[in-house]
Image (spheres, coloured by chain):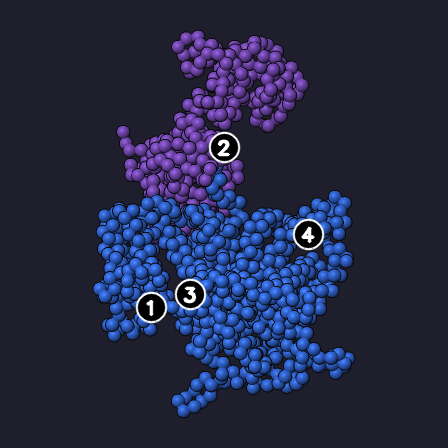
Amino acid sequence: MTEPAVTFRAVTKRYGRVTAVDDVSFDIAPASLVTLLGPSGCGKTTTLRLIAGLEHASAGRIGIGGADVTTLSAADRDVSMVFQSYALFPHMTVMENACYGLRASGLTRAQAEARAADKLRLVGLTGFERRLPSELSGGQQQRVAVARAIVLEPQVLLFDEPLSNLDAKLRRRVRDEIRALQQDLHLTVVYVTHDQEEALAVSDRIIVMSQARIAQDGTPRELYEAPASRFVADFIGNANLLPVTLRHDDATMGTATLGALAVALPHRNLPAGPALLAVRPHAVRLSATGDGLAGKVAHAAYLGGHMEYGVELPGIEDELFAIATDIAQPLRAGQDVRVRFDPGGVAVVRAEEE
Amino acid sequence: MMPLAARAWAVALAVPALLLPWYGQESLLAALRAGDAMPLAMVAWARPWLLPLLAVPLVALAASWRDAPRLLVAVSLAGLAWLCLESLAITHRGWAWAWIGGLLGAAPTQPALGWGALGYALACTMLAAAGLARRGWCRGDMFVLGAILLILGAILIFVFWPVMTVLISAVRDNDGAFAPVLFWEKFSDRSIWGLECLSDARSCGAAWNTLFLAVLVGVLSTLLGLAFALVALRTGLPLKGPIRLLSLLPIITPPFVIGLALIIMFGRAGFITSFLYQTFDIPRSRWLYGWPGVAIAQLLAFTPIAFLVLVGVLQAVAPSLEEAAGTLRAGRWHIFRTITWPLIRPGLANAFLIGFIESMADFGNPLMLGGSFNVLSTDIFFAVVGAAHDQGRAAILGIVLLAFTMAAFTSQRLWVGTRSYTTVTGKGDGGVPPPLPLGLRAACYATVLPWLALTVVVYGIILGGGFVVSVGRDHTPTLKYFLTAFSIDRGVGGWFLSGSAWSSFLTTMQLSVIAMPLTAALGLLTAWLLARQEFRGRGAFEFLTMMSFAIPGTVIGISYILAFNTPPVELTGTGTILVLAFMFRNMPVGIRAGIASLAQIDKSLDEASLTLGARSGRTFRLVILPILRPAIIAAMVYSFVRAVTAVSAVIFLTTAQYQLATVYIVGRAEIGEYGIALAYSAVLIVVMVAALIAIRALVGEQRIGRRQADTGAVPIGLSAS
């Protein structure tokens, strides 16, 4: 097995009494794209900055490419970073920005410009070399930031919410470009975002963080289909969480019962008894008649491609959030409905947060 | 592996030890050329207490080659500590403290430290920084650590130590013996704390006078400043431009010149006094000489500062708040009383405290106009230069003054600093502020317009008074005053500067120009450390750096005399001490300008540069400095202007060889040669305006807009996810 590109061993970062990163360990394999995902304040950006050397760990060891870099300054680490604000030097041209890292590591202007031109071409910015950042659009600035970072061909490339300053349309395109670039150049990328859709779309692996710790670490499919906790189920894919009773039927399968409704699904070795059922919004089946739980449509919204419903279930506090693709015969608010769940979009999770 | 820099500094440490003269000599170059530079390696054999210092470079070399950062830090700090200890303990007169003599016997002596010692201390500091960086301090950044340690060392030596010397000399008599009883006698003296003015006609103590004047000037300058700010921003009167221009003039005016102009107008023989006497038979009096005159002069000088503070505060009050109040059925008075006034209250407190501190520190105007109204800053001066020559008394007066200003400064930072409601969000506010209530507007006009007229007349006298025969009486233009000061004649050896002012003028320019970039660099580097770096003890560091702002110039002057008159650091009578006084006195201006500018620059720019492999030093040079150009201009201009116009600190430090312009002008004015004083002042003002324009052209305008600030960039703070 090859050496991991990044290793975290029991890393903790404290600011005074606040612990921003608490005893976090992970390895990141070379040439993979790993996302740090979580709500704001969960420690994901601090983790990224710890890799960059912009923060130094209060405890634990950090390694890059097999070497211990725990006490090394940012300038001495073989990583580069694309900032949320891009952080393009406003007084330098695109070319000067792109050359900056190479010039800092001692290359002559001619050598640096040759290599920088190569990378600018890669991100499609040939012809913009003499412009100032303020003369570029947001998307172009973003590409300059990426070009500036990859020019150094670092062992690890870091992205801090790179899409947050782009409009929704551009976001999808840039996202795919970043992923394509990563795969073409076999880059090791650590990517921070709070947008679960973005994370699912680009990642080889996702590390979900919550309250300074790792909540779950796995492939997008694992996280979505087998969330380890209520938090992960809720955060990824906006699952509805319903209290159920779990019964083991055999070595793998079990049955979750909620009132009149019983769902067969893998029990994933959770203890039998009270549990939570995570139901994806698109796995909720609503019909005017038939079997299933009795509920009532609280509100309905038409979103062009699909319908969104809020459904009241007796004895359950939160409304059930459902997405239906049937826009031809929408349900109306106030209408009584029957609720069933598609087994493809449900999973059991532990009832209590540990 | 130890960074290369550590090894380089370890080698560099050997240079001062082996090559540069360890003890002070007149000229470094002359000593080197003559080959009689006595470096540490040579003087140490005759002075065995220096031998441990010789061992430091050897250990440091070994430690940096074998990558032993802990040893490196230990040995370099030990070297520094020993250097401080031995140079303080063994003075030019023997043991500094008598009890060591009892312990170690006969007293050796040594002269003041020289270039070698300076280089040695510098290299030791940088080695300590290299070692600490290797141990992971300050995110392993040697440039940051080195800058922190150097600035800290400089501030300890040139701000903290002089102030401590004042405190110590206050409890000693003139011969240096410990005399606590004498201290108490002098401290509780009637001339400081007396309250006789309440009961009879005699003058109160200097402390009460100073306090009274400072409160009066603080309150009045704040109110005047507010009136000006309201007129400039909230009325339709087209006075904004002229007021702003006039508000800049006091900054480039030597402080006492305003007092001079007042004497020419309102003194016993002043032209307005004479006019009133001849026309209305109002008897001539000496009312100007005393607190009224000083207060008027200080108000003319410090109201513009209050104005600038309050304009900023008033602009930061979002008009939409006042509009919102208006839509909630509030009348104009009600809006002003319930919205505007509470929002600007912290700004008012700030303006008051600045006026308070400035009034206390002012030296030139009380000297000109004080008469028998004694204040602390001038009393300190007279205690040193007067017949009494009582350094202890000067030190005690200095302590009282320092206590007042520090109290004001501390309350400004602790109380006002945390109570600002106004925040600049960068969002445009489309609102239009409502017009002022009628009564308030009338009151503002009634104060602003006459005061504006007075200011214009005062500056008319200052700029033009030196070029007429006698202001107010005989307005025949004349160049005789100007030529007395600045004539150039042709003699036997060719052209020479025969005017009486040339020597002081050229010295002032030379020292101010030297101090200008040094002050700006020190201030901006400190600002960058404070604004951008996180390190333990940052709060204390900030307080130390800003403290010199609160130390009145006279206290700086007296403390520099007391601290640097004898070894180990002997600087009095040199131009260096004047440059140092300028630097550490004006540094806070650079710090403020730098911090304000850095606050507008996204921190991720620094971080981007770091992650691209540029170390802090390079980042500072390539990224921060170019963006900081406006702050550099501001810091350079201020340090130049304040060096040229300084009186209080330098009046103690000037010598026949280093006579300064302001001191010369004060001397002329004191003997009644107003024409020359005014002509000289006008020349200084013109030169400063020219310098301002030249600096702007030299440093260049900023090439970029503040795009970075408005791309919606979220500064990555500590708390960001």
Q: Say which element carries label 2.
A: loop
Estimate the spatial distance between the alpha carbons at disc 4 and disc 1, rounded to whole Å: 61 Å
For chain B, the rendered hue is blue
* In-front residue for pair B472/B81: B81
Coordinates of residue A237 in the picture (x, y in percent)? 50, 25
Amino acid type, residue under disc 3 in the picture: Ala
* In-front residue for pair B525/B600: B525
Which dot marks residue B372? Answer: none
Amino acid type, residue under disc 1 in the picture: His
Q: Tell me, by letter, which chain the rendering colours purple.
A: A
Single out the mark in the foreground, 4 or 1: 1
Q: Say which element carries label 3.
A: loop
Amino acid type, residue under disc 2 in the picture: Pro
Estimate the spatial distance between the alpha carbons at disc 2 and disc 1, rounded to whole Å: 67 Å
For label 2, the crowd category at 10 Å Cα-Cα, with few meaning under 14, some 14 to 19 and many 20 or more, is some
Residue at image mark 3: B177
